[in-house]
Image (cartoon, rainbow, N blue to C red):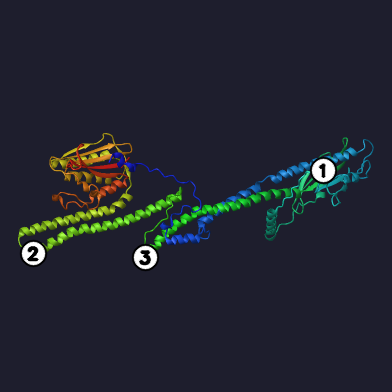
């Protein structure tokens, strides 16, 4: 196997192609993978159950609140009525000036003029010849400011229909209904006093006559007793430079209000259409968010309830939503991974407990046999030999219990300890210096080949040092006088390799994978019982916790085959930078 193949774990997996939009419940996994209780809950729930899903209710309420605030802001800030009022004011001024011009063209060039006495002009005949717009009242005043004639309360001819002119008579059902509801509520819960400044149309027109007699066109608006806006404009009737009378026009805002109601009716119609669309989309959104979250919670609660009710519950099944390209898919994958890791840890602990019991039984059986034989031994040399066996088994048990304790605490300690940045080469030099002296005392050559430049990695220095101490000590224990141990390291693009080699007997090919299992030990006969078989398993666990890999292989000549005896053993540790 090449180095590239061995270090595929450093490459990030490429995500598979998946859809970008998830609608409804198209994420549901096959029914065979769903618990019966969860499937029954889905059938009872339907598309979305608002009474059981606070999240769905929040989604709908928040979407509706945004829609309501938007429409309310449009209705409140809409300048449509103000624009119509300005246009109506300008139009009323133009109409008043036009009526004044009609009176002026009928005035004689010379001689006395009295509008009140119909001297020089007949205002009533002139008024009867006019067709005023609906809702507009006309007042005529003489030079003294006295009202001569008005259309207020008088019968008026129906305006002649104009071909091609369209009148906006669209119904305003929604607006009228809301106005009626609002008026009813205002009547029940408010005690508003009548408008203090309420004024009638003729009073408003009379108030402008004084300024008009001073040759000024004046405009004013006020509220009547019904709370509606009324407009009035007064303009002088001139003969030359002399003011001989005043024409005043007054109009209520009812036509403007009708146009405003039509405009608001359109807005409200669009609002209700958008409201129903928003509710439908909110329900659809809730079904894609609230429902899968509810399924995930229900699956977790189902597992909790099972564990509470039964001693041997079935395996908890988290719905598989990993096909969703969003956070819920990630959450489902994370929960499934956590549950799988939890079950793996439970099974691993069960297997570990079984292995511990098996390993402890061997020295205990040997102790029991030695103690039983000791009672029957007659000679001192036999007793001494049995005592050596007992001492060896006791030390073996002590070492086994210590290693088991370290192995059982390893997971929690790897999680609790804080990682730090350190120089791996400096750590290897310190370890190599210590074991170099030990190897020299045994007549073993100890060779190091480490880079001159520092190689910094992030991890638990003490734990990684434990790995290299174990590998080097194992290599020395398998060597005899005249053998050699070599420790070397190389830095690659995204990893660092640390290799421990020895010229010992090598590793049986069938044991290359087994040696990393707990309690497996492949030792020479003279070293039986001196090792617990947990060292390499602990080393593998530490390396993998750092995101690395560790493997073992035999050293062979380039042109040799697998049947040739190995030249030694090699352990390789790969750590990410």
Q: Residues within 10 Å of mark 1 (few under 14, many from 20)?
A: many
Q: Is 214 placed above or below 368 here?
A: above
Q: Secondary structure at mark 1?
A: strand
Q: Is any atom of residue 253 visible in this view? A: no
What is the x, y in percent for residue 288? 49, 53
Q: Is any atom of residue 347 visible in this view? A: yes
Query: Foreground residue, 114 or 3?
Result: 3
What is the x, y in percent for residue 150? 86, 48
Q: Does the CB distance between marks 3 and 1 fall below 8 Å?
A: no
> Would you identify the image quadrant in which residue 85 lies?
top right
Cα gap from disc 2 to disc 1, whole angstroms = 140 Å
Cα gap from disc 2 to disc 3, whole angstroms = 52 Å
Q: Is 559 placed above or below 174 here?
A: above
Quadrant for the C terminus, please: top left
Query: Foreground residue, 230 or 511?
Result: 511
Residue 76 relative to residue 104: left or right: left
Instruction: Name the outermost residue toward the left.
Output: 379
Is tag 2's residue or tag 3's residue first in the polypeptide sequence? 3
> Would you identify the image quadrant in which residue 142 lies?
top right
Q: Which residue is mark 3?
A: 310
Residue drawn at x 47%, y 61% is 41
Q: Is 434 placed above or below 381 here?
A: above
Query: Foreground residue, 303 or 561?
Result: 561
Q: Depth-wise, is mark 2 or mark 3 nearer the camera?
A: 3
What is the x, y in percent for residue 478? 16, 45
Cα gap from disc 3 to disc 1, whole angstroms = 94 Å
What is the x, y in percent for residue 14? 40, 43
Is tag 2's residue or tag 1's residue first in the polypeptide sequence? 1
Q: Secondary structure at mark 2?
A: helix
Q: Which residue is mark 1?
A: 234
Residue 443 relative to residue 177: left or right: left
Label number found at residue 376: 2
């Amino acid at each position: 196997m090449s180095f590239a193949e061995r270090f595929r774990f450093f490459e990030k997996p490429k995500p598979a192609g998946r859809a970008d939009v998830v609608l409804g419940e198209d994420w549901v996994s096959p029914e065979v993978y769903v618990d019966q209780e969860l499937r029954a809950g889905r059938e009872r729930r339907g598309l979305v159950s608002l009474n059981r899903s606070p999240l769905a209710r929040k989604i709908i309420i928040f979407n509706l609140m945004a829609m309501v605030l938007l429409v309310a802001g449009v209705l409140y800030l809409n300048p449509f009525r103000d624009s119509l009022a300005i246009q109506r004011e300008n139009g009323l001024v133009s109409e008043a000036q036009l009526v004044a011009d009609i009176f002026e063209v009928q005035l004689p060039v010379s001689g006395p003029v009295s509008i009140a006495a119909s001297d020089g002009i007949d205002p009533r005949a002139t008024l009867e010849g006019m067709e005023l717009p609906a809702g507009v009242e006309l007042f005529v005043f003489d030079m003294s400011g006295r009202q001569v004639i008005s259309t207020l309360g008088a019968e008026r001819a129906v305006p002649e229909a104009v071909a091609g002119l369209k009148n906006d008579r669209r119904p305003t059902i929604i607006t009228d209904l809301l106005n009626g509801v609002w008026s009813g509520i205002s009547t029940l819960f408010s005690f508003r006093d009548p408008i203090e400044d309420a004024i009638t149309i003729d009073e408003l027109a009379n108030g402008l006559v004084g300024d008009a007699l001073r040759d000024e066109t004046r405009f004013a608006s006020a509220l009547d007793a019904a709370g509606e806006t009324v407009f009035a404009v007064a303009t002088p009737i001139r003969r030359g430079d002399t003011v001989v009378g005043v024409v005043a026009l007054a109009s209520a805002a009812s036509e403007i209000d009708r146009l405003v109601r039509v405009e608001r009716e359109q807005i409200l119609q669009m609002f209700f259409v958008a409201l129903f669309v928003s509710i439908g989309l909110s329900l659809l959104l809730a079904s894609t968010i609230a429902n899968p979250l509810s399924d995930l919670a229900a699956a977790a609660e189902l597992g909790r309830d099972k564990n509470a009710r039964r001693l041997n519950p079935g395996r908890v099944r988290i719905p598989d939503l990993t096909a969703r390209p969003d956070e819920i898919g990630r959450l489902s994958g994370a929960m499934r991974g956590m549950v799988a890791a939890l079950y793996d840890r439970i099974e691993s602990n069960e297997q570990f407990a079984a292995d511990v019991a098996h390993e402890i039984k061997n020295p205990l059986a040997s102790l029991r046999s030695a103690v039983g034989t000791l009672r029957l031994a007659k000679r001192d040399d036999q007793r001494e030999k049995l005592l050596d066996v007992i001492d060896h088994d006791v030390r073996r048990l002590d070492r086994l219990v210590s290693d088991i304790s370290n192995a059982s605490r390893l997971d929690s300690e790897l999680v609790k300890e804080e990682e730090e940045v350190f120089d791996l080469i400096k750590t290897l030099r310190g370890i190599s210096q210590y074991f170099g002296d030990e190897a020299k005392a045994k007549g073993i050559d100890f060779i190091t080949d480490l880079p001159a430049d520092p190689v910094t990695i992030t991890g638990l220095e003490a734990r990684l040092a434990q790995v290299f101490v174990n590998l080097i000590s194992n290599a020395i224990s398998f060597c005899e006088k005249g053998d050699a141990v070599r420790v070397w390291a190389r830095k690659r693009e995204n990893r660092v390799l640390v290799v421990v080699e020895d010229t010992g007997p090598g590793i049986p090919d069938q044991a290359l994978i087994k040696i990393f299992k707990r309690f497996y030990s492949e030792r020479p006969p003279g070293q039986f019982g001196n090792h617990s078989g947990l060292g390499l398993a602990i080393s593998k666990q530490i390396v993998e916790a750092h995101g690395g890999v560790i493997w073992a292989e035999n050293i062979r000549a380039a042109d040799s085959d697998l049947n040739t005896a190995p030249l030694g053993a090699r352990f390789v540790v790969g750590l990410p930078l």
